[in-house]
Image: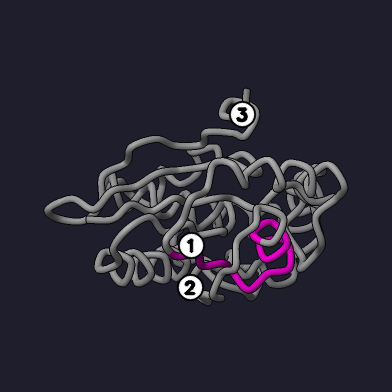
Amino acid sequence: MGRLLLVRHAATPGTRRAAFPTDEALDPAGLEEAGLLAALLPPDRAVTSPALRARQTAEAAGLDPVVEEDLAECDFGSWAGMSLEQVGRVDPEGLRAWREEAWARPHGGESLAQLLARVGRFLERARGWRGTTVAVTHGGPVRGAILACLGAPAAAFWRIDVAPASLTELHPAREGWRLVRANRTVARCVP
């Protein structure tokens, strides 16, 4: 039996201003946060999203991960780099549709349903892994994994907070996964 530790990447300038992500680097405080993760992550296997911020988090945490494409954040298309407030001004109907309809993709990128299917594929593969796996990823895939564990509908996605440099722990269950802990931040883990 294994366990899966999902780690949201540490902070970037975009996460600090609540912007839809681009492929940006960690900021200095984010690099420091990521370094604190090293003591908490004793993996048998490490995987990461292909995004720079995830790879930097893994490296700062002392991991040598394999890139796992299904751990990428949702592709936000034309909204990348914009804050939620900006999108609300520029495309209020698109934003409403995106939050209410799992298959909506008004930004031209990926829908929530597509993201959840991708995360589901990753979780299915990970069920067969032994030992502890650390997966450095993003808020969207972590929320998706929590929904999968709980059998919750896509609408619940918006009710889950996932802080930068936080840990969410899953254990395989008879069917699917069991949520052991969620959104445990480095500040609450390191004395």
Whether pointer 2 and pointer 1 mark residues with C-beta atoms closer than 8 Å, the reply is no
Reply above or below: 108 against 73: below
**Earlier residue among tags 1 and 3:** 1
Q: Which mark is residue 190?
A: 3
Magenta stretch: give its range: 45-58
- How would you rate the neighbour count of disc 3 (Cα within 10 Å): few for under 14, some for 14-19, many for 20 or more? few
Q: State the separation of the CA atoms marked 3 and 2.
A: 29 Å
Reply above or below: 93 against 68: above
Quarter occupied by the N terminus: bottom left
Asked where in the image residue 140 lies, by quadrant, the reply is: bottom right
| In this rendering, the label closer to the viewer, 2 or 1 | 2
Residue 150 forms part of the magenta stretch: no
Q: State the separation of the CA atoms marked 1 and 3.
A: 33 Å
* Residue at disc 3, secondary structure: loop
Question: Does residue 115 appear in this view?
Answer: yes
- Kind of residue indicated by mark 2: Asp
| In this rendering, the label closer to the viewer, 1 or 3 | 3
Q: Nearer the viewer, residue 101 or 118?
A: 118
Q: Is residue 92 left or right of residue 129?
A: right
- How would you rate the neighbour count of disc 1 (Cα within 10 Å): few for under 14, some for 14-19, many for 20 or more? many
Q: Give the residue at mark 2.
A: 70
Residue 131 horizontal/vertical position (percent): 32, 58
* Residue at disc 2, secondary structure: helix
Q: Which mark is residue 112?
A: 1
**Earlier residue among tags 2 and 1:** 2
- How would you rate the neighbour count of disc 2 (Cα within 10 Å): few for under 14, some for 14-19, many for 20 or more? many
**Earlier residue among tags 3 and 2:** 2
Q: State the separation of the CA atoms marked 2 and 1.
A: 14 Å
Quarter occupied by the C terminus: top right
* Residue at disc 1, secondary structure: helix
The residue positioned 82% from the left and 43% from the top of the image is: 17
The residue positioned 74% from the left and 70% from the top of the image is: 78
